Image (tube, coloured by chain):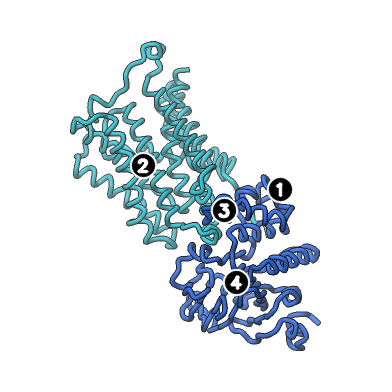
Amino acid sequence: MITLIDGLSLGSIYALIALGYTMVYGIAKMLNFAHGDVIMVGAYAIMVTLSCSLSPVVAIIVSVVLCTLLGMIIEKLAYRPLRGASPLAVLITAIGVSYFLQGLAQIIFGAESKPVGSSWKLPAIPALNKHGITTAALVTLICGIIIMVVLTLFIKCTKTGSAMLAVSEDRGAATLMGVNVNKIITITFAIGSALAAFAGMFYLLQIPNAEPMLGAMPGITAFTAAVIGGIGSIPGAMVGGILLGVVEKFCLASPLSSYTVAVKFSLLIIILLVKPTGLLGKVSREKV
Amino acid sequence: MAMLEVRDLQVYYGMINAIKGISFDVNEGEIIALIGANGAGKTTVLHTVTGLVTPKTGSITFNGVNLLKIPAHQILSLGMAHVPEGRRIFQRLTVYENLKLGAYIMNDKKQVEKNLDYVYTHFPRLKERKNQVAGTLSGGEQQMLAMGRALMSNPKILLMDEPSMGLSPLLVTEIFSIIQEISKEGTTVLLVEQNAKKALSIADRAYVLETGSIVLEGDAKEMMNNDDIKKAYLGE
């Protein structure tokens, strides 16, 4: 039970990150490999804000705003000039942005891992904690679910949301409907990066240290989750993320614990062998 | 002045000169047919008019506005809607969601409801299937949806690309009679068709496009009796 809650909680962190990958892929048709590093920037933003002895609430706001802007800036400066370029050029650029952010963090903050500050923790809830359930896991799980529900409603019920679905399916046809594709792509990057900021916060609740490589492993795991769920599919990213989180925690609790990473990535291979489009991925059909 | 004026349009795809300096007019209230064989450049002309393709030279003026200066996504708000070749409806969304996207630029909710009613009156089939996922519609229904979606923004002119493609003769007749109805209600139509016979039967005037150039233009009824046209396009 505790392992399950821990797994669901870690899974919702992965799901939040995976949503960023999958939305950007669905709408801009590119893999934003710098996405994981946005989490790292968000973590440092929290650390710096707290070190100015501001409250954690201010730190949350600073982190979300900074990550959102960062996502929009990355899109504008690095990816927009490559609109229409070969996918390989865009992919290499994304990897370049990723190394750039990691390098920048190393120059500014140094390579070693630094504690974010003692005020970044949640109050204990004795009734739960004595059963082994941490407050952090519970808060992460609940907030993660709320964020995912809000996102789903946003996409389903707003004009911008349906424009996003339209752009992801057919950019040209969406343009003919009067949708400004560039604007929708910018909004997508902004939302994806804000989700990454939230993921970063929850991550820091479990491991309260910031380091330049912080985003790398959760980033690649969440990318795997997005592919398992079916890249481009929003419910797929949620399912994939939660699945990987649960698998990881159960693996860590079993005698196989030292093979956890291998198990996670083998899961990807197995699922792609059985269902190459991912769990909820759709095969696009042409009908004339 | 014509509603839509295209002058000396030249379009290149890389080194290939797809459109070799064509000019044509569409007047308000008309149905204009642009006919020609596969590969003549008909679709390219429409894509250029709605900004999906940028021409090398030439001008496109719509109600006095230079369309080449307007980004593609703003052209619809000028009153020009495009029903693209192959319908290009949003397959994963429902019929209703597709229609709502057709009114994406409209802010007046009451007007959107009115337009929805207008579309449902012309295409009762879409009303029956409004909650169905668009990808599961038949070809004819998808064509109706593409037309309905384009009508959701009250366009002044409707650009239609091969509405007859892949449809049974019965459905083609149905679609063409709806085009005539829409035209009677005041929407100007620029119709691109391979099915020359059908297109000429409802059009006021027509232009014949051959490998990127206009080779013939004139009254649609006269063109139906033109021996060259009969031989080349009407199969008589």
- The hue in which chain B appears in the rendered picture of the protein: blue
Residue tagged 2: A36
> What kind of residue is marked 2?
Gly
Query: Residue A221 location, x and y as percent?
Result: 42, 37
Q: CA distance from mark 3 to mark 2?
A: 33 Å
Residues tagged by mark 4 and mark 3 found on one chain of the structure = yes
Please tell me whether mark 1 or mark 2 is closer to you in this view: 1
Q: Quadrant of the C terminus of chain A?
A: bottom right
Chain coloured cyan here: A
Side of B27 where A84 appears, left or right: left
Height in image: A263 above or below B131?
above
In the image, what residue type sits under mark 4?
Thr
Callout 1, which amino acid?
A: Arg
Residue position marked by numbered label 1 in the rendering: B129
CA distance separating discs 1 and 2: 43 Å
Select label 2 or label 4 by which is in front. Answer: 4
Task: In the rendered view, tell whether residue B69 sits above or below residue A217.
Answer: below
Between label 4 and label 1, give the one nearer the viewer: 1
Task: State the residue lying farthest toward the bottom.
Answer: B227
